[in-house]
Image: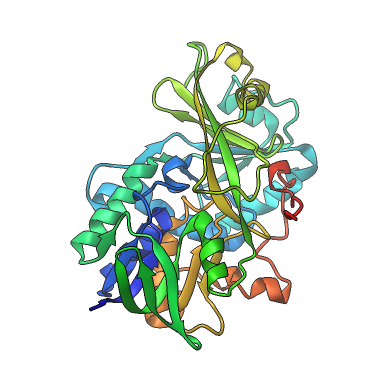
């Protein structure tokens, strides 16, 4: 006899577990299924930046609604805190300085505590930073980063406390449908009947959707990260997003700094071997030493390659699938899903149980936008990151 649930969530990363928690908190009977261990995909390797600076309002609102959950984790979710407060800065080249100031105005109107800084003001704030090529910076004094594994485990724990069934090491092999209606899923552990299925499977989502006859405009992509041990003369620094170099870096514990190395490896197999390229440490060192010259004496601690699912326009795909009643997507977060996960969970639960998301309007992220030729992109973007430029499709 098949197991039954109101909703099956496919994927045990930060967004899948957040959705399961939010649904269980509303009284839904939830089953979450993950083919491996929870947080074994992109979430477990995430740099987990917690910031609110975006160039589009919908992402910014999701991040703003999520921030209190990270900051007040123990009070809201129980368990140990997951958030480390460092402050956050994003820098842009001179030709994008006015766009940054416009985006700061948009963020402040939402309620975000942020300020636009001149290069001199940034230098006053972080004296060890090179600002020669900086046109402007946005500062968020309240932001920082979170612990990826502890965040996922916290959502798992609370969802389970509220009655959700969490099934690691249970691969969903097929989404079952009859005509235009979802009936549940088949798994390596048996069938689960459900009136709604949420595909939150990250890099595995395109494959699962393809088997459903639903081409997903998204591709798995590599993400490379290097950690270095800071030299004594470089103090703890803020989280930086460096739009000039197309990268980011943040502290990791008391003596380490983590830097994102631009990666252009597309269509990778998330089940295959993942090897960090030999030149990644040198590229990471170049990024760090350009922005913080004192990092020249840093030493390599470790490096690793992970992956995520990137949509065609580099924004998440959230919402129902037109023509397939009961099927929902929460995937293709394009490297930016961690910081918005608490609000994504709430909004997806509202959408499934109430018919629409109320906390934040997530309609701009609906799958149908690709057919309609629209994008959530805001009016004041920054330079496109080279590692996100459209690559050729495989033959």
The residue that appears at 36% across and 66% down in the rendered structure is 187
The answer to which image quadrant residue 90 occupies is top right
Residue 299, horizontal then vertical, whole percent: 53, 14
Residue 91 lies left or right of residue 18; in this view the side is: right
Picture coordinates of residue 346, whole percent (x, y): 39, 66
Residue at point 59%, 21% (across, down): 127
Q: Position of residue 266 (x, y in %)?
A: 65, 48
Q: Nearer the viewer, residue 67 or 111?
A: 67
| Screen quadrant of the N terminus | bottom left
Q: Can residue 90 be spotted in the picture?
A: yes
Occupied quadrant, residue 207 = bottom right
Q: Is residue 237 visible?
A: no
Q: How is the image coloured?
A: rainbow
Q: Is residue 255 left or right of residue 308?
A: left
Tell which of 276 and 254 is nearer to you.
276
Query: Considering only vertical position in the picture, is 374 above or below 270?
Result: below
Q: How far across and how far down the image is residue 112, in percent?
A: 51, 52
Picture quarter with the C terminus: bottom right
Q: Judge from the rendering whether residue 8 lies leftward or rightward of residue 216; answer left or right.
A: left
Location of residue 148 with respect to 198 vertically, above or below: above
The answer to which quarter of the image holds residue 342 is: bottom left
Residue furthest out toward the bottom: 179
Q: Residue at x 39, y 43 (%)?
A: 148
**Residue at the spot 68% in from the left edge and 60% down from the top edge:** 313
Front one among 173 and 288: 173
Farthest-out residue, right = 95
């Amino acid at each position: 006899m098949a197991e039954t649930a109101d909703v099956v969530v496919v994927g045990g990363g930060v967004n899948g577990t957040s959705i399961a928690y939010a649904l269980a908190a509303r009284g839904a009977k939830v089953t979450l299924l993950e083919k491996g261990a929870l947080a074994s995909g992109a979430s477990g390797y995430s740099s987990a930046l917690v910031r609110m600076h975006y160039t589009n309002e919908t992402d910014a609102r999701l991040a703003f609604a999520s921030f209190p959950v990270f900051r007040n984790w123990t009070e809201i979710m129980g368990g140990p805190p997951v958030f480390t407060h460092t402050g956050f800065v994003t820098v842009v080249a001179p030709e994008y300085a006015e766009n940054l100031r416009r985006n700061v105005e948009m963020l402040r109107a939402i309620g975000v505590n942020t300020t636009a800084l001149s290069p001199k003001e940034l230098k006053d704030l972080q004296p060890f930073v090179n600002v020669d090529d900086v046109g402007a910076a946005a500062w968020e004094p309240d932001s920082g980063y979170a612990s990826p594994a502890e965040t996922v485990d916290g959502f798992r724990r609370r969802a389970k406390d509220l009655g959700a069934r969490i099934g690691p090491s249970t691969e969903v092999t097929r989404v079952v449908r009859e005509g235009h209606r979802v009936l549940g899923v088949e798994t390596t552990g048996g069938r689960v009947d459900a009136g709604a299925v949420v595909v939150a499977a990250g890099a595995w989502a395109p494959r699962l959707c393809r088997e459903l006859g639903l081409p997903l405009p998204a591709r798995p992509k590599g993400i490379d990260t290097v950690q270095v041990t800071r030299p004594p003369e470089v103090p703890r620094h803020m989280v930086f997003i460096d739009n000039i170099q197309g990268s980011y870096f943040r502290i990791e514990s008391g003596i380490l700094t983590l830097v994102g190395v631009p990666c252009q490896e597309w269509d990778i197999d998330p089940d295959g071997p993942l090897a960090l390229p030999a030149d990644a440490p040198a590229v990471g060192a170049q990024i760090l030493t350009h922005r913080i010259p004192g990092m020249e004496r840093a030493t390599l601690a470790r490096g690793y390659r992970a992956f995520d699912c990137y949509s065609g326009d580099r924004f998440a795909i959230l919402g129902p699938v037109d023509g397939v009643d009961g099927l929902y997507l929460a995937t293709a977060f394009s490297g930016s899903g961690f910081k918005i996960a608490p609000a994504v969970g709430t909004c997806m639960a509202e959408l499934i149980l109430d018919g629409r998301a109320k906390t934040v309007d997530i309609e701009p992220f609906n799958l149908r936008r690709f057919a309609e030729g629209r994008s959530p992109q805001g009016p004041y973007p920054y330079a496109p990151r080279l590692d996100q430029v459209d690559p050729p499709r495989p033959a």
